[in-house]
């Protein structure tokens, strides 16, 4: 199975997101990327949409339900939301949706800032491995991987996808530029 080209996925996601927002009567959404890959996808998506608004960023490390098991990632940075959350229509963007735990953590953090009018979830990839009832509203592609495989987004420019074998010394690298 070859990995899709992120640039192609971004283009189709921009069209799907525009259609979804128009159908819901949302004309001024606020974009929020989940650090790090979700921020890269958000930047590319906003460029494809011609959006020049400020991008919010979330680092959900403190909100993860596995924080006590895994500890704190050494590259934790503060979240930055340069706009109100209360009453806003948000577009929450992640790179790879797997278990749904990152998105759950992001929603918890967002609601600490206020109660949005709506949240539209966008993900570059859905690995069809949900542990929680969380599915993207707009997705670039859905993949099913072997239990010992993962996909990692590399970026920020150009965005590429890399297939990785868990526990292997070397990753199975596949360029998607």
Image (cartoon, helix red, strand yellow):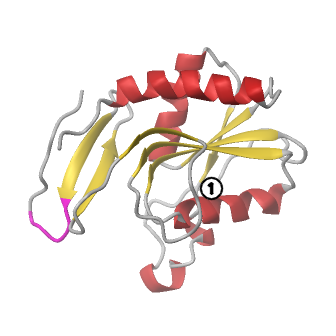
Q: Quadrant of residue 10?
A: top left
Nearer to me, 153 or 79: 153
Q: Residue at horizontal 57%, vertical 27%?
A: 16
In the picture provided, is 24 more to the left or to the right than 169?
Answer: right
Q: Residue at horizontal 75%, vertical 27%?
A: 23
- Image coords of residue 2 (percent x, y): 18, 39
Indicate whether 65 appears above or below 59.
below
Which quadrant does the C terminus fall into?
top left
Indicate whether 27 appears above or below 39.
above
Identify the element where label 1 is drawn.
loop
Q: Quadrant of residue 176?
A: top left
From the image, tell me which residue sits under label 1: 78
Stretch of the chain drawn in magenta: 165-169
Q: How many marks?
A: 1
Q: Residue at horizontal 48%, vertical 73%?
A: 72
Which quadrant does the N terminus fall into?
top left
9 in magenta: no
Nearer to me, 57 or 177: 177
Q: Residue at horizontal 62%, vertical 65%?
A: 105
Nearer to me, 86 or 144: 144
Which secondary structure dominates the residues rendered in magenta?
loop
Structural crowding at the residue carrying mark 1, measured as other residues with C-alpha within 10 Å and reported as few (<14), some (14–19) or many (≥20)? few
- Image coords of residue 114 (percent x, y): 86, 55
In the picture provided, is 61 more to the left or to the right than 73?
Answer: right
Q: Residue furthest top?
A: 50
Indicate whether 84 appears above or below 13.
below
Q: Residue furthest bottom?
A: 69
Q: Residue furthest front?
A: 23
- Image coords of residue 158 (percent x, y): 32, 27
């Amino acid at each position: 199975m070859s990995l899709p080209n992120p640039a192609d996925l971004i283009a189709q996601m921009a069209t799907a997101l525009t259609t979804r927002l128009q159908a819901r009567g949302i004309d001024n959404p606020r974009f929020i990327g989940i650090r790090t890959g979700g921020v890269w996808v958000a930047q590319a998506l906003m460029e494809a949409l011609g959006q020049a608004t400020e991008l919010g960023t979330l680092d959900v490390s403190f909100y993860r339900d596995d924080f006590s098991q895994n500890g704190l990632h050494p590259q934790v940075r503060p979240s930055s939301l340069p706009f109100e959350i209360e009453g806003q229509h948000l577009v929450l963007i992640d790179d790879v949706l797997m278990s749904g735990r990152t998105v759950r953590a992001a929603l918890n953090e967002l609601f600490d800032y206020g109660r949005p009018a709506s949240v539209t979830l966008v993900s570059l990839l859905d690995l069809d491995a949900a542990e929680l009832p969380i599915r993207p509203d707009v997705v670039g592609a859905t993949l099913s991987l072997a239990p010992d495989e993962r996909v990692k987004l590399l970026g920020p420019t150009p965005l590429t996808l890399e297939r990785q074998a868990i526990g292997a010394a070397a990753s199975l690298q596949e360029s998607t530029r």
